[in-house]
Amino acid sequence: MKSSVIIFPGSNCDRDMDVALKKFGFKNQMVWHNDNSIPKSDLIVLPGGFSYGDYLRCGSIASKSKVIKSVIDFVNSGGLVLGICNGFQILTETGLLPGILQQNKYLNFICKNVFVKVKDKKNKYFKDIKKDILELHIAHNEGNYFCSNDEMKSLEDNNQIAVTYCNKNGDEGDENNPNGAIKNIAGIFNNKKNVLGMMPHPERMIDKYLSGEDGSLFFENLLRNLN
Amino acid sequence: MIIKVVVTLKNGVLDPQGKAIQQTLNGMNFNNVDDVRQGKFFEINVNENDEAKAKLQVEDMCKKLLANLVIEDYKIL
Amino acid sequence: MEVTEKIAVEHGLKKDEYKKICDLLKRVPNITELAIFSAMWNEHCSYKSSRKHLKKLHTKGKHVIQGPGENAGVIDIGDDDAIVFKIESHNHPSFIEPYQGAATGVGGIMRDVFTMGARPIANLNSIHFGSPQHKKTKNLLRGVVKGIGGYGNCIGVPTVAGQTSFDESYNGNILVNAMTLGLVNKNKIFYSKAAGVDKPVIYVGSKTGRDGIHGASMASATFDDEIEEKKPTVQVGDPFTEKLLLEACLELMAGNSIIAIQDMGAAGLTSSSVEMASKGKLGIELNLNKVPCREEKMTPYEIMLSESQERMLIVLENGKEEHAKKIFDKWNLDFAVIGKTTNTKKIDLLFDNKNVASIPIDFLAEDAPIYDRKWKKTKLPQKLKFDKQQFKSLNLSDCLNKILSSPNVSDKKWIWDQYDHTVMGDTIQKPGGDAGVVRVHGTTKAVAASVDASATYCFSHPLTGGKQIVCESWRNLISVGAKPIAITNCLNFGNPEKEKNMGEFVECVEGIAEACKYLDFPVVSGNVSFYNETKDKGIKPTPAIGGVGLIKDYQKMITMDFKKSGNIVYVIGKTEGHLDQSIFARNILLEKKGPPPSINLFNEKNIGETILNLIDKNLIQTCHDVSTGGILTAVSKMCIKGQKGLKINSFKELVNKHEYFFGEDQGRYIIEIENTNIKKVNDLLKKNSVHFDNLGVIQDKNLSFNGEMNLPIEELTKTHKYWLKNYMEN
């Protein structure tokens, strides 16, 4: 399987994502934001970081990059696009995903492990994943997901909510919501479920010496589903 | 009454956001944009009928909270 | 405008220093030249009060590739890998504007590291605030933490460890010390020494504005009507530009274009150009009209003094300009050829086709004043005689709870949750342990780093305090299984013109020197920050030590959390029960006199090496050094981290339990051992003549002792975590 990770000025999880994808068997390439086209890929990843310093609104300036047109074409042709953290923010700013990521409710950057519940498995990302509750890692200042009532209705009607914050038993109470996201949303799909944006970083949880290993489950599963 | 305030970085203080926005606008073919400075806009509803008094209070707020006078200026509109 | 003695004094020069300038030049300097002298001869650049004493530091060793004097120190960690690291203060700017002050502090230290060709892999910080009750403390803390996070998180370098303390001596002068570690191939290290004549001098990065032109500029403004417009401004950090600068510099460094490179830190273009020329024994000529400026009508004076951030000065090989420009264009950064190296051994500045300054480089560097300031020795305070009858009324649980929830001991999670500590995917020990540990990417090695300061001990007796803090750094590295390699020091002191403050500096340095030499733990970089005082009152002497150690096989790294019920816990090292200057004495007995615990360097070394040996042989599960708060505080933290309890044995021979549990004797560790390894551990400890006490056995839920203390770990956890979060959020 071939993947491409796009580097925007200010991306800083591009290498981490490259390491993770290669570890699980993807043939990964790095693509510069100013490129006109993206090499043939089965998966495109918009990595985490602070593209353009998070200036104006997180992801807003990156969403005007030259390469984004190719990303949109790729999505329209059914290709898989994964946006992590700042990548998720870029996807909402391009309009590929609905809603917006606002500043965390308690106004602080948060870096810690969280649990998320997989809400939908009828998609390439989570089909047959071995656990329903994953321990992943978040590191963001703007992860407080928000959308309009209409958008929420359509997210729910089409099962587009991908993962929600919870505790290790799967309870989604307020106390398990780290950033104030509406309905504890940690990640969503587009309506065709080929685009996934999520705040947690699976690439930081890929061996037992790091924060945990549930990120490995995510990548192994994704690769299996793509084969 | 609603008092409007704009807080901007002082002249000469580096505005990294403004700079990034300007470069992006140029990249989007708004070629005649030479400089962008960004700031914050406040609408403050003060329970007060006398405009002069209200503005005086808002000025105090600017000095004490809304603006960081080390790097920012404020303007009451 | 004529330069006079008055103007020179307004620029921070002493009268005799100004006279020396006139004598050297054999004329009166112009205002731009005066500015250059004032920048180069000030304490920050010239180390004029400290240099004599810094020479005492032990700076060499088999791992040292580069000692003090470069942008940062460099150590060899094998296989062509080297670690570049340094700590630096940004105290005064952080007090004026905490967010930007702290942010630009982090930005500056990272530039020092990547200037040498290293990719930053870990950040640390040591931050010290006034009393929690002081009205400014909360906002300063919030701003500093946000600033450190704002910059480091954006660049994408994990912040892996740090230290925070509160003491009223910092009420009017907080300390913000930032440290960075970078990784470089030891054959691809870049230095600031220029070489060769007629080589192009390149300016890259952000544009130059009137940022941070210090108080000195107020004087210069007197010859200008637009005084308001020219008020000195705080430097604003732009981490996004720094990230681009980092990537662009590393890209350029991959080729063979750079002869010398230096970041523009304090005193910006002045110190960077003078240092490059001075080290290369060359001259330098700059055309200031070529310097990219952000503001209009900037004068040579302002251009030379500006402290705008995210800028670098590079001496390139001839003919590499186009290649370099392409890289900086790609990253959307300013690039300008602003001058060349010369054989004149002078700095010559051109502006509007006129020569606006011409000064022999030696006058600025080698001829800068050096002072042998008067200093006063601090006598070792007399040891106190505590009334042990009084202890009987002090319940152990109450004392422990008080200590665990005290500002300086309480959990600092509220702070480090705001720092990205996992980006780069190699952080294997997060903040909150004895040291932060990051893997050397793609290898089996890992690097441990910690930062420590103990102003209380240093204030009581600087010589002992200086030794102690080096030992504490050493122990923190040992505790994670790392072999201590070298340190960087940030020496924060009061006014060197006062004998007491100068004495504190001299004796702390001597203490540091003695410990470093004995432990073969050399100082490879550092920074001195004097004049930390307000209204004539200096801070407590606060040398911060950043230690770096190597773990050859990261799978052998250990942590401080208790692992398994039934395992045995030992105290390693002898406990005499030294209470003077302990947190128990200060916070519970309200007794602030007495000497700090003494240091036995032989024991330190022997015990430390023995612990490393135990870790290397996989004989122990857990290790934590005993520091502030003594044994009981140390084991409580280990219980909390592992969510395990501990049943402490009752001792017949115990002289006094308060002294035993809360004494702060040095050179001690707590270790956890599997039952099956006990004999081997005992044998090794005995063979090395290391004293140990069998403290107890790990149990599930409670920390208990003799029926007189039985604390649920859940409760201890809350006590430990409560203070800071509650303080900041209410």
Image: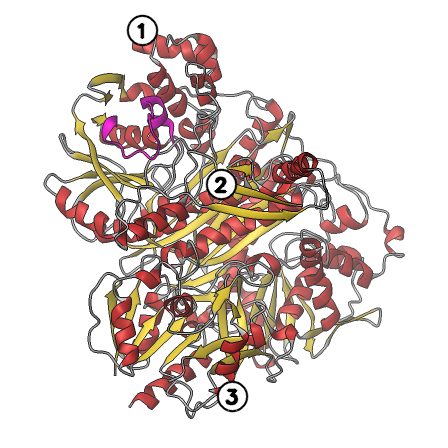
Work out whether residue C129 or residue C434 is closer to the camera in this orientation and state it. Answer: C129
Quadrant assignment, res C346: top left
On screen, residue C100 above or below A119: above
The image shows residue C662 at horizontal and vertical percentages of 73, 56
Quarter of the image with the C terminus of chain C in it? bottom right
The image shows residue C602 at horizontal and vertical percentages of 54, 50
Q: Which residues are magenta?
A: C288-306
* Residue A118 appearing in the image: no
Residue drawn at point x = 67 percent, y = 45 percent: B1
Q: Are marks 2 and 1 on the same chain?
A: no
Q: Which residue is mark 3?
A: A132
Chain at numbered mark 2: B
Is C197 inside the magenta-drawn segment? Answer: no
- Circles 3 and 2, Cβ within 8 Å, touching? The answer is no
The image shows residue C79 at horizontal and vertical percentages of 28, 61
Chain at numbered mark 3: A
Quadrant assignment, res C312: top left
Q: Which residue is mark 1?
A: C27
